[in-house]
Amino acid sequence: MRYNKIRKMDISNGPGVRVSIFMQGCAFNCKNCFNPETHDFLGGKEFTDEVIERILNLCSLDHIKGLSILGGEPMHPKNIEATTKLAKTFKDKYPNKTIWVWSGYLFDDLKNKEVMNYIDVLVDGRFVDELRNPNLAFRGSSNQRIIDVVSSLKNKKIVELNFDKKIPKEVVKC
């Protein structure tokens, strides 16, 4: 498993100030993806236990609200084991901070995966260029959903979150 980059202070991928990791490798290759450099499974850097420790240390600061895991595709079969390990380790250490994950896979395809036990929010669905909307919060196209994973698993139905009405337009465009 490989990763592309880590952002120590990210304000665009989830609410509040967060640490973000961009996993390396994606088979979807969505047209006009905003991270095409993450598609090659052989690119980026090696994902190790030291990388997990670095992320945990970055997340220890009080102003960090959580961890965002993007890609590439963190839920691809080649990446999901490392994503699960990172998410579990993070939740064990920071149970009151949130994990947001972006995936081209749909919630129904992922709901029985172990990693879902550690994720708070899943932004699901592939980016569709024809549905691109820069005014949406935390996603690029209107087909993508922001899902409350904990409530969805508990209620056995998808519970979506709506941030679009709460975030001023100028913040969304940043």
Image: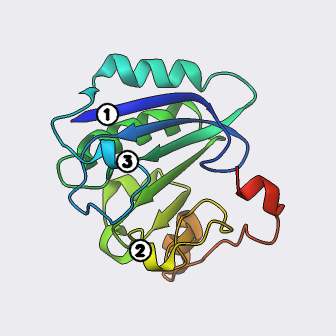
The residue shown at (75%, 29%) is 63
Crowd band around label 1 with a 10 angstrom C-alpha radius: few (<14), some (14–19), many (20+): many
Per the image, label 3 sits on a secondary structure element best described as loop
Q: Nearer the viewer, residue 117 or 3?
A: 3
The residue tagged 1 is: 3
Q: Amino acid at mark 3?
A: Gly
| Drawn side of residue 14 relative to residue 168, left or right | left
| Drawn side of residue 105 relative to residue 95, left or right | left
Mark 3 in CB contact with mark 1 (< 8 angstroms)? no
Q: Is residue 67 above or below residue 116?
A: above
Q: Is residue 55 above or below residue 113?
A: above
**Residue 60 percent coordinates (x, y):** 63, 22
Numbered circle sitting on residue 71? 3
Question: What whole-number distance in Å separates the C-alpha atoms at marks 2 and 3?
Answer: 16 Å
Per the image, label 2 sits on a secondary structure element best described as loop
Q: Amino acid at mark 2?
A: Val
**Residue 173 percent coordinates (x, y):** 71, 56
The residue tagged 2 is: 128
The residue shown at (25%, 33%) is 2
Which numbered disc flags the more N-terminal residue, 1 or 2?
1
| Drawn side of residue 23 relative to residue 98, left or right | left
Q: Nearer the viewer, residue 31 or 51?
A: 31
Give residue 95's quadrant in the image.
Answer: top right
The residue shown at (66%, 41%) is 96
Q: Amino acid at mark 1?
A: Tyr
Per the image, label 1 sits on a secondary structure element best described as strand
Numbered circle sitting on residue 125? none
Q: How many marks?
A: 3
Q: Is residue 119 above or below residue 17?
A: below
**Residue 171 percent coordinates (x, y):** 78, 53
Which numbered disc flags the more N-terminal residue, 2 or 3?
3
Mark 2 in CB contact with mark 3 (< 8 angstroms)? no
